Image (spheres, rainbow, N blue to C red):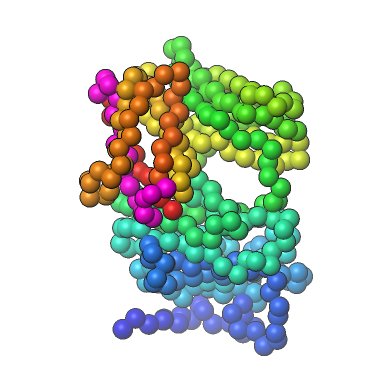
Amino acid sequence: AAGVTFKETHKINAQSGSFRTQAYNWTNVVRTALKNADGTIHLDEVLIRFSDEASVAKTYTNAWDAASLNEGGNVIVSFKDANRLAIQTRPLNFINDTVKLGITINTSGSYRLAFSEFDQFTTASIIVLRDKFLNTEQNIRSNDSYLFSVTSDALSKGDNRFEIVFRSSTALPVSYIGITAKNKGANEVEVSWQLPSETDMKNYVIERSADGRTFDARGSLNSRGNSVTTESYTYTDAPRLSGNSFYRVKATDKAGRTNYSPVVKVNINKNQVSVALYPNPVTDKLNLVLQNLEGKYTIKINSLEGKTLQTFTGSLTGGNIVSVNAQGLSSGVYILDITDSKGNRIIEKMVKQ
């Protein structure tokens, strides 16, 4: 039978973060549970709470934080520095705060994060789950469940996949129509993006990555100001990387709020075909930014077993953004098989919420 192991390092002399003699009213709490894919089996959970007590800090203290005792095959922890915690307490000024989560899972497959007890947060804040493996974000307050997959890729689990980010709730007044990146000249990459309108924007920072996960700023462009019509921007990055490059654009408004574009990939081979998916995970409509595919295309949505569930066909004429309807699919992980009339083929993973 499974059990809990108590170690000497778990012993403390003072009141702990999990056992306190006095009552305390926690007004700001986020509970995160690790569950199986359909949410029927509760595997583990962590608690993040906020307090205005003077002794509470963003560094570990055993008076307010409790270590995780779970060393099984399905574990979720939160971090303060290198401390793996089941319960952590943070200062009440939670806006612009980030908490890293760690996931231990021994068996590949689909799992779910479920969030609760966050209703008492002020309306001046939002709570975001950041998936650094898929380069996606989800507003927890508007969607309290997140389906994800663990694969043979070591980065699909572990201590660096997920973060919970606390931000201002006021929406950033910009959205992206599309973003592309393509080789230009002998040693350059041209990054272009479009915006349907702009309101009080400050600038756009172009970021590049060699692995699609860790990004560095390459340059920036100032906003042209307020606009109610479509605005297009182009930035040339040099020198380019020798292999794959991933690009995204960070928009910042005059109030300091930020918003990221989808990530796009470019290869030194100008004929390299690629696709960027957003949003992924998807709820209803999935957008595909197709790079270097030409003419007629076919998009198949296949199960992990290889069965074709949906097929979409069309022609790329005057653009490279295609949208498909994924609303009828059940929650889970699917494989996109994309081909064009020249025989180019792309295989990508899609997660349906």
Residue lying furthest front in this view? 328
Q: Is residue 121 magenta?
A: no
Q: Is residue 47 left or right of residue 223?
A: left
The structure residue drawn at horizontal position 69% and vertical position 67%, both measured from the top left corner, is 120
Give the image location of residue 250, x and y in percent: 61, 35
Is residue 307 placed above or below 252 in the rendered structure? below
Residue 338 position within the rendered picture, expressed as x and y whole percent measured from the top left: 31, 32
Q: Nearer the viewer, residue 325 or 54?
A: 325
The quadrant in which residue 165 appears is bottom right
Q: Say above or below: 339 vs 334.
A: above
In this view, the residue in front, 151 or 102, is 151
| Residue located at (62% from left, 80% from top) | 16
Task: Identify which residue is drawn at 45% across, 28% down.
Answer: 321
Task: Examine the rendered structure and indicate whether residue 320 appears above or below residue 144.
Answer: above
Image-based side of 133 in relation to 201, left or right? left
Taking the image as shown, residue 56 lies to the left or right of residue 137, namely right
Q: Is residue 141 visible?
A: yes
Residue 166: x and y in percent read 65, 55
First to last magenta residue range? 327-343
Q: Residue at x 36, y 50 (%)?
A: 329
Name the quadrant of the N terminus: bottom left
Numbered disc total: 0
Q: Residue furthest left?
A: 306
